[in-house]
Image (spheres, helix red, strand yellow):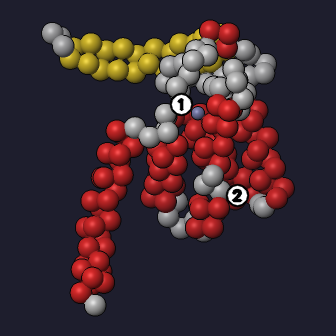
Amino acid sequence: MEPIVHILIPLVFLLAIFYKLDKKYVFYLLPLTFIIDLDTYIPGTHRYLFHNLLFVILISTIVYFAWDKRAYFVSLFYLGSHLILDFAEPGVALLYPLVQKTYYLVAEITYYSGWDLNLWFGSMSITELPTDYVAYYFTTYAALFLILLGVLLVAKYGKDLKKFFKD
Ligand SMILES: [Zn+2]
């Protein structure tokens, strides 16, 4: 999943549900939503070296000692959101290094000549992970999310923009 989706989805959910939370936690910790993907740059380790619970707890503990308990929970949420959003095949190695496997969810409802429901959990040994992994930095979906966000921003601030260009 591309960085923009890893950033936008948890950010918007956090702002919507914990709207009273001090924004310095929300924005200063935001880079945590994608640091898990740094294992993309360590050949042959993507989806397990940093994509696991131990890494999430380790980083959040550092955040706790560097800042406070509230920052710890925001960190857990941001890092955990990355694991959840990557839970599609080939999934994430939740229990690495204890268990050398990724886990993933398949949840699809489709209609072709009849309804088809696919709902199951899968797992894969880390040795079976694709090595020719393509890292997507931007996709059509990210563009569509941004267009949708743009529509809302224009709806909210359109008048101010008009005023700005008139003056
Ligand atoms: Zn990832």
Q: Is residue 105 visible?
A: yes
- Count of numbered tags: 2
Q: Secondary structure at mark 1?
A: loop
Q: Indicate the quadrant where residue 36 lies.
A: top right
Question: Which residue is nearer to you in this view: 69 or 11?
Answer: 11
Question: How far is mark 2 from mark 1, CA to CA?
Answer: 29 Å
Whole-percent x, y for residue 13 in the image = 47, 52
Whole-percent x, y for residue 19 in the image = 50, 64
Rendered position, 100 above or below 87:
above
**Residue at point 40%, 16% (across, down):** 119
Q: Disc 1 marks which amino acid?
A: Ala
Whole-percent x, y for residue 113 in the image = 15, 9
Q: Indicate the quadrant where residue 159 lies.
A: bottom left
Which label belongs to residue 46? none
What residue is shown with label 2? 71
Q: Secondary structure at mark 2?
A: helix
Q: Are marks 2 and 1 in contact (CB under 8 Å)?
A: no
What residue is shown with label 1? 135
Whole-percent x, y for residue 26 in the image = 59, 60
Question: Which residue is nearer to you in this view: 71 or 144?
Answer: 144
Q: Residues within 10 Å of mark 2 (few under 14, many from 20)?
A: many
Closer to the N terminus: mark 2 or mark 1? Answer: 2
Q: Single out the residue that lies furthest toward the right.
A: 65
**Residue at point 72%, 29% (across, down):** 42
Which quadrant contains ligand 1? top right
**Residue at point 51%, 54% (across, down):** 11
Q: Is residue 53 visible?
A: no
Image position of 116 (left or right of 31)? left
Mark whose residue sits in front, 2 or 1: 1
Q: Disc 2 marks which amino acid?
A: Ala
